[in-house]
Amino acid sequence: MATPIERWVEEQARLTKPDKIYWCDGSEAEAHRLIEVGMKEEKIAGNPVFQELNQNNWPNAYFHRSHPTDVARTEHLTYVCHPDKEIAGPNNNWMAPEDAKSLMTKLSDGCMEGKTMYVLPYMMGHPDSPYAKACIQLTDVSYVAISMRIMTRMGKNVIEKIGDRNDFVKGLHSVGDFDPDKRFIMHFPDEHFVWSIGSGYGGNALLGKKCFSLRIASWLGYQEGWLAEHMVILGIEDPKGNITYVTAAMPSACGKTNLAMLESALPGYKVWTLGDDIAWLNVGPDGRLYAINPEAGLFGVAPSTSMKTNPNMLRTLKADKFYPTLFTNTALDTDKNEPWWEGLDGSTPKNLLDWQGKPWNSAKDTKAAHPNSRFTVSIYNSPTLSKEFDNPKGVPISAIILGGRRTKLIPLVIEAFNWQHGVFLGARTGSETTAAATHKEGVLRRDPMAMLPFCGYNMGDYFKHWLNIGKKLSHPPKIYSVNWFRTDDNGKFIWPGFGENIRVLKWIIERVNNRVSAKETPLGLIPDLEDLNVEGLNIPEDKLKKLFEINNSEWQAEFKDMEKFFNQFGKHTPAEIWQEYKTLSKRCSI
Ligand code: GTP
Ligand code: SPV
Ligand code: MN
């Protein structure tokens, strides 16, 4: 008798018609074989799927060039297919489930002809964790199979774990013919099912990541009383050896990976990494909030990663442990056969191919590496990996940090007065768009809790859910807003960022441990300047003040934009959010 997994796989194979079906076991030997297949047999836009890189300088590293139109998440083609449009909310594209399925059935008919269908059994979360989920993804490209092995806990034990159950998380993925007009990422939250065609890019194709662990999991969390968030998890060790765990939400390409791997500029402090993108947060029996990272790998932005900005990431990328590490759409130094990107240490190599494989030189006004070029590497390669990473219960969270990319207006750090005010700080967050999704860069949009593209249900209800979680916590984390990106009159970042962000983290852990006071402003609590260690930074006093400046007249446009945003959700926007909004706009009136 076929198992539910076998029956489901057969059904998908009848539609997609692969030449072969290969069940992955997640072993290293298998990964070597699939890389070989990707180097010798499979092609994307005429290029081999993988190219071996210089193994002396970049151990276990392989290069991948995507289809040129397929370099970022495509939010406009991403749909959340609840039976009722109102559940999806104005924050999601919506299609009725039966319409989405008939469209996808048409597009998927025979889409794997001549190809291998890889069956990927994987866990999101540690298999022993009560919060973990067992999943099966199907795909037709070795790049996705290998990426999933790095990013998740993949192995045939998951098949045994699922056994006769039918409620496993399902993902059907095909790159199709990469036609950008036939590229769809469809979510069926009630069926725990994601169906994606036309793209091999991370968030569109690694279906355990944003699709399941955020869009669908946020919906499960709403129903079951937990939170799925676009957050890093880190432990901050102080000079006495005490470790305080915090999470931080920041929109795509706004500093999560850098924060998660931070090398402290202050002696005696150390950051331990638990996750760089996604956190599942549960209320523990002790009334504290516990975080696990459902992922097991890092899919990070390459440009500007260097020994200066993020040395721990370079150490991770060069570690000779978990096989393999991937580089996607970086430039290629053809003399050394090494990946290269803008911002990497050292001088620009003489002979470079750009991310599309064309000769490039610095006289060109284009970037050699795609701004959203990325690496895929196991978190177990990281020298800063927390010893709690595999703890099935997760770690207790003392502070939640909510950030955005704002060149103006938003202070370096603000502490919320209380949970409700903190939820408002998150809900009002705006951020300037980046290259992580295909849209115009640098445009301000509201991005509450960095979840705008990832909240799988009505965002008004999501705010309500956050407020309710707060009521269940007897020891709620304190909530902070941060902004590393405020600029001076010359357009330069005022705050040095990266390893220096430890100075802000230090203040935060001193606050949660009741060691320092704070100053009240209309926006929330900010550091007394003597409590924020800025020794050695040489930031002139006037610029330091600018980092915390609140200019009421500049805030008026912000209020208008917030009001418009909250109004979209109609009766779903909680009264508490409007109450906080009114209080703040009154405090900042001109
Ligand atoms: P996703 O993987 O897309 O979710 O992004 P992320 O939030 O992990 O962003 P990441 O840490 O990769 O940072 C992306 C960009 O932000 C890079 O260009 C970094 O150089 C820049 N960045 C990160 N931290 C800082 C900082 O503290 N200051 C400044 N100025 N830039 C930063
Ligand atoms: C992001 O865009 O937030 C990422 C990369 O972390 S992706 O996996 O594509 O979502
Ligand atoms: Mn992300």
Image: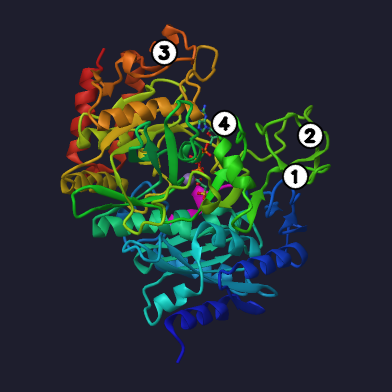
Q: Quick one: SS at disc 4? A: loop
Query: For residue 391, which quarter of the picture?
Result: bottom left
> Ligand 1 closer than 8 Å to the CB at disc 1?
no
Nearest to N terminus: mark 2 or mark 1: 1
Q: Residue at x 25, y 59 (%)?
A: 223
Residues at marks 2 and 4 touching, judged by CB atoms closer than 8 Å: no
Residue 67's place in the image compared with 371, above or below, is below
Q: Residue at x 72, y 33 (%)?
A: 366
Q: Amino acid at mark 2?
A: Pro
Q: Quick one: SS at disc 3? A: helix
Residue interval drawn in magenta: 72-79
Check disc 2: other Cα within 10 Å, few if <14, some if 14-19, many if 20+: some
Residues at marks 2 and 1 touching, judged by CB atoms closer than 8 Å: yes
| Residue under label 2 | 349
Q: Amino acid at mark 1?
A: Glu
| Residue under label 1 | 338
